[in-house]
Amino acid sequence: MTSAAARAVEATKIYGSSDTAVTAIDHLSVEFEQGQYTAIMGPSGSGKSTLMHCMAGLDHLTSGQAFIGDQDLGVLNDKELTELRRDRVGFIFQAFNLIPTLTAIENITLPIDLAGRDADSVWLDSVVKNLGLDDRLSHRPAELSGGQQQRVAAARALASMPTIIFADEPTGNLDSTASSELLELLRSAVRDFGQTILMVTHDPIAASYSDRVVFLEDGRIVDEMVEPTPDSVLDKIKSLEG
Amino acid sequence: MLRLTLKSLWAHKLRLGLTALAVVLGVGFIAGTFVYTDTIGKAFDGIFEDAFKGVDVIVSADSELQFGEGIYLPEEEILQLGDVEGVDELVPFLQGLGVVILDGEGEPIGGQGPPQFAFSFMETDVETGGFNLREGAYPQGPDEVVIDAGTVADNSFAIGDLVSVVAPNRPVAPYTLVGIAGFGELDNLGGATSALFDLRTLQTILEREGQLTGASIQITPGADVDVVIAGLEPLLPEGARAITGQSAAEEQAAEIQEGLGFFNTFLLSFGFIALFVGTFTIANTFRIIVTQRTKELALLRALGASARQVNRMVLIEALIIGTVASIVGIFAGFGLALLLKIGLEAFGIALPTAPATLQPRTVVLSLIVGIGVTVISALLPARRASRVAPIAALREDLVAPPRKALTRRAIVGSAVTAFGLLVLFFGLSVSLDTGPPEIVYVGIGAAVTFIGVSILSPLIARPVARVIGWPFAKLYRMPGKLAQENAIRSPRRTSATAAALMIGVTLVTLASVMAASIRGTIDDIIGTGIEADIIIRSTNNFDPTASFTPELAARVVEDESVEEVSRQQTGVALFIENETFIIGIEPNYSEFFPVDDSQGSLNPGPGEIVIDQTVADNNELPVGSELVLVFESTGPKSFTVVGTATGDTWTDVIALSQEEWIVNYEVESDTQVFVRAAPGYTPEEVQTRLTVLAEDVPTAQVQTFEELTSDVAQSIDQLLNLITGLLGLAVIIALIGVTNTMTLSVFERTREIGLLRAVGLSRRQTRRMIRSEASIIAVFGAVLGIAIGIFFSWAILQALSDQGFSAFVIPYGRLALYIVATAILGVVFAILPARRASRLDVLEAISYE
């Protein structure tokens, strides 16, 4: 029926128990279509990170369901979840994305190596070339700039051709130049390779690179926007706050 | 500040607990050793108290030799002492060694260490101390024997049984077991067998008619013991003395205590090795904790704590840990004492025991050593902590204080190593001549060398760990590769952890190479160096002077399979203040023991002696010079050196003619008979024939030289296993260090492990990664240890080369086994940190600061 790369159905996540319980996401349903670049925005505590963690198989829902493709994450054990993350999901975190002991190329192929598979060298070459990392492959993370590090993380996410890439504030630690470079690269991955990306951000400019912005507040979706621009996003945030 | 220290201790209780464990084990071993040897000492005190209970005065020979065959006194003169004023009752006694009881199958009992005693035993009206009859009757007449309760029980003898007994010069003879005796409350004398006969019978068995070893005297009531002794003295036979029973007990106890002292030192040295290893483990843990607490320490500094206060905080932590761990260690010592007893018994070292004894000295020493080691280990980390800059609290990139430059490390490390080796070689060169006290230099030199190598080892940690990690990367792919990279990333930590293991492995390697080389030397000498096909020797492998009847050799030489025999006798005499083995040889000896070179005659006559060329050189005794030997039975006697010989089989030989030897030792029995096969007979055929001939001499065994070398090899291996077992403690402490390092590394890399888990590292792969890293570190330590161990043994064997150690054998198989074993142990000791790493919550780990 669906071309959704990932979806949540009545997803609820409650932290703690009884009187101290905090509802992070609350009966939330959402779909992320294949080949779409979605940004999730919302104030601190709105549940955007929790949603992403649950969608990515890093955390369990209290109730409801999360799917990657047609796979219900709730029925998977730790081993199966790990394999799902390894084979079908890509990650870009805000910081500390890379293993310091591995070179750039080793970091990029890490999930593939963990699976014991061989990397598709043609694909790998094009990813590396696209991200402008050709001459940095044998460097260790400590020898790379912040922007380069995040691009290596992006390359890693892309290398295994995952169903979906989760990016958690990927530009949070970058200056504006490095930031726009990375965002442009993610944008082109969607455009050129049909990659699906779900990005959590609080930066309207970052959000403007996406196809669709989902606004969260108190664990629920409060609004959506397609074809966003920095200004329209900013306006929407203001109106939501107001 | 103290409250802060206590809080910080509590906060890091797990890591500190592991640190403390190293101290607990080391102190426990030391305390355990003292408890064990004190307990044995007390047990022996008890034995000697029993031995002389009720004896007022004891008359015995005054021997200069500790390992001699015993001095015999004329019976007539001793018995006359009964007439001395104040002597109420005089009980003469006789004792001898090498009187062997045979079991039901006709095989000798004992001879695996403890002696085989014979005592005279008779009913008296007075207390004579020693054995007391538990069951049955006293032995009377030439056909009766009483045996100690231990031997009776072990062999299921019963009163009325015929039990066979063999004495050195005599054939097997059956005796009726008429009674069972105990020694005070003990069933036997520390594992020895004791056959008790009436005096006349024992004199016959020992061929000591008209001779005694001494007498117990009870004085008349009211008489003064000193006065009685003064009255006895002028009448004593030559070489005899009279002392009170009490001082005899004290004297013998003191002798045992001295022996125990060596034993104690032997065991203690392993405890100190373990603690030395412990200092590495403790220092490493403290250093890692200090590094991890950099931010916290910097904050303290920023808030106004002085560098001294921070330093003191870390030292007080160490003091508290040391104290608690030492106290726990003392209690653990009781358990370890029990383990020692069980372990040593497994190696056939059985000693009498009493209730466990804890002396104040044990407590004090354990506390000093335990606390001292912990605080000293924390000195460097504490200094490092005090150097944390306050700014490090605020800046991420300043977490690690600047490291020493590599060149400086190389220079300091090389200097320390060189100094250590210098002391080691000095120690080796002096201790070989002078013996024990200078051996301390060898120990200090080795310890300093270890420190030097551990300073240097980070320099080679990267390449070596990379090579060691290679198979892991091949086997486990990515997790193995990650482990390999992790082992390399902090060479200091890897090296410091490995260094502790290095020490244990060095010593184990040293023991193994030495054992293999000694075996090699033995193969060279007795395996191939002796021109004989068969050796007949005593079944007692522990007493080189244990002998058997010469009648056997007389029969052997008549056999058609035998071409020629050469008999040898062995005894102990004082030679230039040392108790030395003196052998008696036949004129054909040098045909059986080929010489490389010789001077003078190798066939000594009366009053003449032949010695090893090296002995001659070391003591300036050229052919024609005179030397004096002091024999236990016959006293000092001067000999002319008529010949010297060089050759592998002549090392340390000091030989008299057989006739001369018999004159001085007053016995005729052989310790070895070397046999050459007649043409047409293989050694095995000769062995079969001679074994039949020797059937009625169960104390002699007929062996091929192959069997002899394998027997010797077996006892060397047994000793090697004992030493390896004792070094196991040091290895365990080092392995606890591995657990510690891995626990702290996992803690430190929480975020990284979280990331790996997020991008697809399974739990199983996580465990593999951690365990492989531990294994790489452990193997690194083993490789270093084996390299140094081989070098140390080479150095020692070089130093010993003029003492006849010709072979340098590296037991490759065994050393390879050690590497495999350490690899496995590394995995085992990383099970806990690996499990911890695999169970980290991925989300929490990623967001861990």
Image (cartoon, coloured by chain):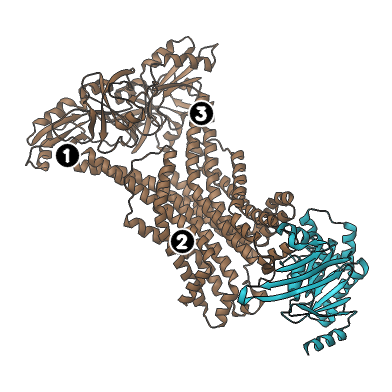
Chain colours: A cyan, B brown
User: Residue B373 has which mark?
Assistant: 2
* Residue A174, horizontal then vertical, whole percent: 79, 77
How far separated are the C-alphas under marks 3 and 1? 49 Å
| For discs 2 and 1, the disc positioned in front in the rendered view | 1
**For the view shown, which residue lies furthest in the bottom direction?**
A242
How far separated are the C-alphas under marks 3 and 2? 44 Å
Q: What amino acid is at disc 3? A: Thr
Determine whether B796 is above or below B693 in the image: below
Asked if residue B414 shows in the view, the reply is no
| For discs 3 and 1, the disc positioned in front in the rendered view | 1
How far separated are the C-alphas under marks 2 and 1? 49 Å
Chain where mark 1 sits: B
Within-10-Å neighbours for mark 2: few <14, some 14–19, many 20+:
many
The one nearer the camera, B187 or B382, is B187
Chain where mark 3 sits: B
| For discs 3 and 2, the disc positioned in front in the rendered view | 2
Q: Which residue is mark 3?
A: B709
Q: What amino acid is at disc 1? A: Gly
User: What residue sits 68% from the left and 73% below the top?
Assistant: A14
The one nearer the camera, B585 or A242, is A242
Q: What amino acid is at disc 2? A: Val
SS at badge 2: helix
Q: Which residue is mark 1?
A: B54
Q: Earlier in the sequence, mark 2 or mark 1?
A: 1
Picture quadrant where residue B600 is located = top left
* Residue B826, horizontal then vertical, whole percent: 60, 52
Query: Do the residues marked 3 and 2 share a common chain?
Result: yes
